[in-house]
């Protein structure tokens, strides 16, 4: 395993429903018209990301996948500054209709 600080590995993911539940129960919230970001301390030396991109808000799989790629890329590029927290990102219905630069700017503000 390499130590590339820009990787997005299994250790950087929230994998279990218990992990997600901890974030939802103890979260600090940041939101705008495209994303809601929930953040919680994890007492680890790594940041972890969970995605909650619903079919209800984003109908087409191609749009859901685009949002997931953008969110993961933003997380990967900012991973060094996020150590010790768990993050869950939820997307609103408006996010699927917006272009990539606007969404990236929105994620950077959170």
Image (spheres, rainbow, N blue to C red):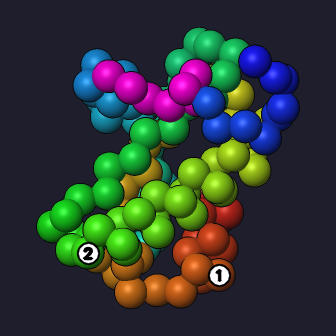
Residue placed under numbered mark 1 in the picture: 101
Horizontally, residue 20 falls left or right of residue 6, namely left
Q: Which mark is residue 25?
A: none
Residue at 55% across, 26% down: 10
Residue at horizontal 56 percent and vertical 75 percent from the top: 103
Neighbor class of circle 1 (other Cα within 10 Å; few <14, some 14-19, many 20+) is few
Q: Is residue 14 located in the magenta-colored stretch of the structure?
A: yes
What whole-number distance in Å separates the C-alpha atoms at marks 2 and 1?
20 Å
Q: Quadrant of the N terminus?
A: top right
Look at the image and say whether residue 107 sits in the magenta stretch: no
Q: Are marks 2 and 1 in contact (CB under 8 Å)?
A: no
Residue 31 in sight from this viewpoint? no
Q: Secondary structure at mark 2?
A: loop
Percent x, y of residue 24: 31, 34
> Where does the magenta region start and end?
10-16
Query: Which element carries disc 1, helix, strand or loop?
Result: helix
The one nearer the camera, 39 or 20, is 20
Q: State the residue lying farthest toward the left.
A: 56
Residue 60: numbered disc = 2
């Amino acid at each position: 395993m390499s130590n590339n600080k820009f990787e997005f590995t299994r250790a950087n993911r929230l994998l279990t429903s218990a992990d997600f539940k901890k974030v939802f129960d103890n979260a600090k919230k940041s939101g705008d018209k495209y994303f809601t970001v929930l953040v919680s301390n994890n007492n680890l030396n790594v940041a972890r990301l969970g995605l909650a991109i619903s079919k209800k808000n984003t109908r087409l799989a191609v749009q859901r996948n685009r949002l997931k790629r953008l969110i993961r890329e933003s997380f990967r590029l900012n991973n060094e500054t996020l150590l010790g927290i768990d993050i869950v990102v939820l997307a609103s219905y408006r996010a699927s209709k917006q272009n990539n630069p606007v969404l990236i700017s929105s994620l950077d503000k959170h």
